Amino acid sequence: MTTCWCGSTQFLPFSPEYAECSDCGTLISLAGKSADELSVDDDETDFYGKAYWLSHQSDDLGYPDIHKRARVDLTERNLHWLKTLLKYRLPGAKVMELGCSHGSFVALMRHAGYDASGVEMSPWVVDFGKQTFNVPIFVGPIENLDIPHGSLDVIALMDVMEHLPDPVATLAHCLKLLSPNGMLLIQTPQFRREMTYAELVKANGAFLEQLKSDEHLYLFTKDSASRLFRQIGAEYVQFEAAIFSQYDMFFAVSRVPFETYSQEDINAALCSVPNGRITLALLDLRERELASEADRIARGEQIETLTRITKESEADRAARWEQIEALTEMIKESEADRVVRGERIERLTGMMNESVASQASLGEQVRHLTDELQNTESDRKEQVAMLNNKLEKINAERAASEEQVSLVRKELRVLFGHRLFRLIAKLAGWREAKKLEDKINQP
C-alpha cells in the first residue's frame, strides 16, 4: 500500500502516475522506488548510475549532459545558491552538498572560502567531480558516511529532496549532523494544491517537467515541506527567491531563529580570503547579468506591448480606412440625393410661388366678398329696422283692437245681462243663448 511521508494512506487522484495526499497535500509517485532500487552498486546498469548522467539526461529528458552542466551551472544556479548561502553563513563554515552531481557548487564554495565537500550515489559521478574540480566528494548515501553529529554548519540539498524514498528519515539524519545553529539549504520542485493535471496539460505548464514518477517520488508544497521539518524538530523555514521560480521553491531550514549578514559583512568576509575577491567579482557579474536580463525581459515585454499596439493600430487603421470608404460612398450617395433634393426644392418652390400668387388672388376675392357682405349686412340691418318698426305698429294696432274688442264685450255684457239672455233663450232656445253667452265672455 502506498503511504505518504506524513503517514497518510488517503489520496486524491491527480494524474496517471501521481496521487495527492488528502492530509498534507504532497504529490506522491505511484510508481515509487525503494532505497535499494536507488542505490548504485553497478554504474553501468543501476538507475542513478553513469547512464543517468549522460544518455538519460540528454536523450530522455532533453537536458544538457553532465559535461555541459559542469560548465553552465557555475555561471547561473551555483552563483544564485552562493548568494543566499552568504546571507546566512559567511566563508569558513563547514558545508556539505548532498547530491552534488559534477561538484561545481562544491568547487565554488571552496573558492569562496568555505570548507565544502559533496556526496553522490554513483562512484562514476564522484570520480568525475573529483577529476573535474579537484574537490572532496564521497560516495553516499549520507547515512552510510562516518560524519560526527553536530559537525556541519550547512547541508545543501539542491534538487535532491524530491528523490528521497524516505525524506523524513534522511532529513532527520541530516539535522543530527548539523551544529546547534546549523541549517539546511534546499531547492526542490514546488507543487501548488490549486494545480490540476488537466489544466497543466492544456496550458503546457512548466510544472509538467517535474512529473517524473521514477525519479521525483515526493513533490512538496510550501506547507507540506514546512510541516515535515516541524515534525523532525526544525520549525524555522525561510523561503527565498528560486532561480527557476516557475516550478521550484528555495528555502533555508533551522532549529533556531535565523541570523543574517549584511552586504557589507559579506564583502568584508570575501575580501579576507585568498580567492574571495574573484568570487565577489563573479557575484557582481551575475548581478549585472541579472539586471541586463531583467532589462532585456522588460524590453521584450515593451516590444510585445508595442507589437500588440502596432497590430491593434494596424487593425484600427484598416477599420478607419473601411470607415473612410464607407463614408466616401455615403457622401457620393448623399451628393446624388442632394441633387435630387435640389430638383425637388426647385419644383416645390415653383409650386409655392404659384400657391402664393393664388393666395393673393384669393385674398382679393375674400376682401371683395367681405365688402359685399358688409354692405349686405348694412342693408339687412336697415330692412330689419324698418320691419321692426312696422311690426311694432302692427302690434300696437292689434293691441288697440283687442282693447276695443274687450270694451265692446264688456258693454255687451252690461247691455244684455240676464234678462236679455233669458229672452233670447225663450226666443231661440236655451242652447243658442248659452253659445251667445260663451262668445260674449271670451276675452
Image (spheres, rainbow, N blue to C red):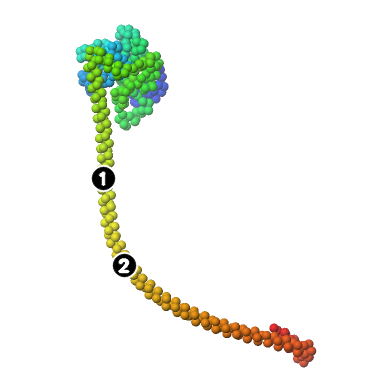
Residue 45 visible (yes or no): no
Residue 359 visible (yes or no): yes
On the image, which quarter does residue 165 sit in? Answer: top left
Please report the residue visible at 42 percent of the width from the left and 78 percent of the height from the top: 368
Give the quarter of the figure containing the C terminus. bottom right
Residue situated in front as seen by the camera: 137 or 234: 234
Please report the residue visible at 47 percent of the width from the left and 78 percent of the height from the top: 374
Above or below, 423 relative to 174 = below
On the image, which quarter does residue 182 sit in? Answer: top left
Residue designated by label 2: 347
Residue designated by label 1: 317
Question: The disc labelled 1 sits on which kind of residue?
Answer: Arg
Residue situated in front as seen by the camera: 413 or 37: 413
Above or below, 267 relative to 356 = above
Quick one: SS at disc 1?
Answer: helix
Viewed as shown, does residue 210 lie left or right of 432?
left
Residue 312: percent from the left, percent from the top?
A: 28, 41
Quick one: SS at disc 2?
Answer: helix
On the image, which quarter does residue 356 sit in? Answer: bottom left
Question: The disc labelled 2 sits on which kind of residue?
Answer: Arg
- Marked residue nearer the N-terminal end (2 or 1): 1
Give the quarter of the figure containing the N terminus. top left
Residue situated in front as seen by the camera: 397 or 182: 397
Q: Residues within 10 Å of mark 2 (few under 14, many from 20)?
A: few
